[in-house]
Image (cartoon, rainbow, N blue to C red):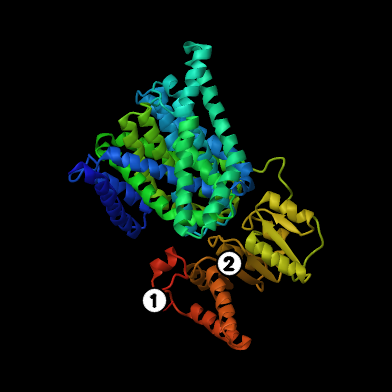
Amino acid sequence: MPHATELIAIIALGLVLAFVCGMVAQRLRLPPLVGYLLAGVLVGPYTPGFVGNSELAGQLAEIGVILLMFGVGLHFSIGDLMAVRTIALPGAIVQIAVATAMGGALALAWGWGLGAGLVFGLALSVASTVVLLRALEERGLLDTDKGRIAVGWLIVEDLAMVLALVLLPALAPSLGGKTEEAGHGAAHALTELIGGLVGRGLADSIWLTLALTLAKVALFVALMLVVGRRFVPWLLDQAARTGSRELFTLAVLALALGLAFGSAELFGVSFALGAFFAGMVLAESDLSHQAAADSLPLQDAFAVLFFVSVGMLFDPGILLREPLSVLAVLGVILLGKSLAAVAIVLVFKHPVGTALTIAASLAQIGEFSFILVTLGLSLKLLPTEGRDLILGGALLSITLNPLAFMLAARVEAWLAERPDLARRFERHGADAIPVSEAGRPHRGHAVVVGYGRVGSSIGKALASWDLPFVVIDRDRRRVLELREAGIEAVFGDALAPGILDAADIGRARLLVSATPDSHQARRLVEIAREANPKIDTLIRTHSDAERRRLEEGKVGLVLMGERELAFGMTFYALRSLGLKEGEARLFVDASRAESRAEPPAETEIAQSTPELRPHKAEAAEG
């Protein structure tokens, strides 16, 4: 093939095969990422047929890394991290250390060097944020406490890997690798200047190299936080004032790529770190959402090419040549990391359900692992066998990740029916708070289980009408805050013995299950009705399929959040377009009754996708 068409060929075939394989993966209920990696395998040198130019694909992949890290920085939220810092920060650090040690031990057992063991262990320690967010969103866990902890946990992992990308090149010579090629502009000149001042022998010292690297990174970070956070939003605002969408999009891409390249040339830091901080300072602009929307198509396209290029490096023969090594890698990813996460979360006195969700979230590896592999190969730290084992582990772990979440849900449901057993796993130290405070007896009150966004809205409404209610929540800090605000709150799992009794469930008029966890709802109602057969119940769920299953169990009124939102918006739309209030309300009530009566059209779709996605006919009409 003529050299002039190689670029077109690798982009065209890469995107076409990624689309086809991604669609197949989606139909098989697998993450599209599996399809993208498989597309790379198909055009790689280890499979028959067309072989793409791996060097050219690698350069395109570098753009993918820059845009991927730019997107991570653009969506990075200090607030999300600080909200769960007490568990996510120490938990993620300990888990990274444990997983890195396990991966390093495997590498040393196979006769690799210390540097290879470090890169290999780090690559196995970090999970894919892309895969995690999709898994949490599909299961309605993204806005739950355990979902927020999982996201915060991975934010810490991402930050740790960004630091690793900075330090590994500096440490490479001492770990048996090689330094990156000279020529990083001002950064290289500064290094040479220091070498001339202190002597070449001292300049080559590992500690001086490390100190110099950290100093350059600190200078870059300070410059970005002081100057960048003012200049970048200003430049974006100037582009927006032109009224040209093309110029605005170009400004976003120029900032992402320009700052990444400039940071590497001037400070010697990686493209990834430069792009991450470019996104982070841009996130403070009022135009950040538009910037994210405009850069997303290119970000997605080049990220896909990045995954394709990684797949091109994978030799499927490793699965047959080294099956035991592949199983050992899978053991670290699926079992080692998960068990470590469960132990860490329980040590920090969080519920078993949270521990299981974190464990399932970490039972895979993804984009940062691939970036580390690429860096490890370029520094001559990681052997090609390590690359193949990591890529094989990624493909298999991402494929099996839905099963990990399914197993976690089943174990959580099984433990929910055995609260005594669940309590044995949960630690209650000296700083544990009392389940409830001595107060006046209740009668005719509401018991609100879960005081997140939904539960707190219900509680505020009850309080505004001076109606009595008691909250049950498993979040220690939230319970203390409620008690300080004068709201009666019970600390613990509502399914545990004595917790509902502490809320006087026997004399309550209403039980509200405001948590998104539908697995415990049926058992919760059973326990409540054993103590109070006449109690009214209100259950929250995320899909019509779950609602119907709960209603078949006669648990009382079950509301599906997205559908109730649709009814509210429908009522407003009808009133806005001229219908009388009574007519609009009558129509919405009839629609609500009809939705409860009709069976789901396609069970699989109802269980796996949002309820309000329109059918083709409805979409055409809209």
Q: Residue at x 49, y 78 (%)?
A: 595
Give left or right: position of 375 versus 282. left
Res. 620 mark: 1
Q: Amino acid at mark 1?
A: Ala
Q: Amino acid at mark 2?
A: Arg
Q: Nearer the viewer, residue 511 or 24?
A: 24
Give left or right: position of 408 versus 30. right
Q: Nearer the viewer, residue 270 or 462?
A: 270
Marks 2/1 in contact by CB < 8 Å: the verdict is no
Q: Quadrant of residue 395?
A: top left
Q: Earlier in the sequence, mark 2 or mark 1?
A: 2
Q: For residue 330, say whether it is visible.
A: yes
Residue ID for mark 2: 540
Q: For residue 132, say whether it is visible.
A: no
Image height of 458 relative to 15, above or below: below
Give left or right: position of 4 versus 468. left
Q: Nearer the viewer, residue 471 or 43?
A: 43
SS for callout 2: strand
SS for callout 1: helix
Residue 158 x %, y %: 50, 41
Q: Residue at x 52, y 26 (%)?
A: 213
Q: For mark 1, does the 10 Å Cα neighbourhood hold few (<14), some (14 to 19), or many (20 or more) residues? A: few
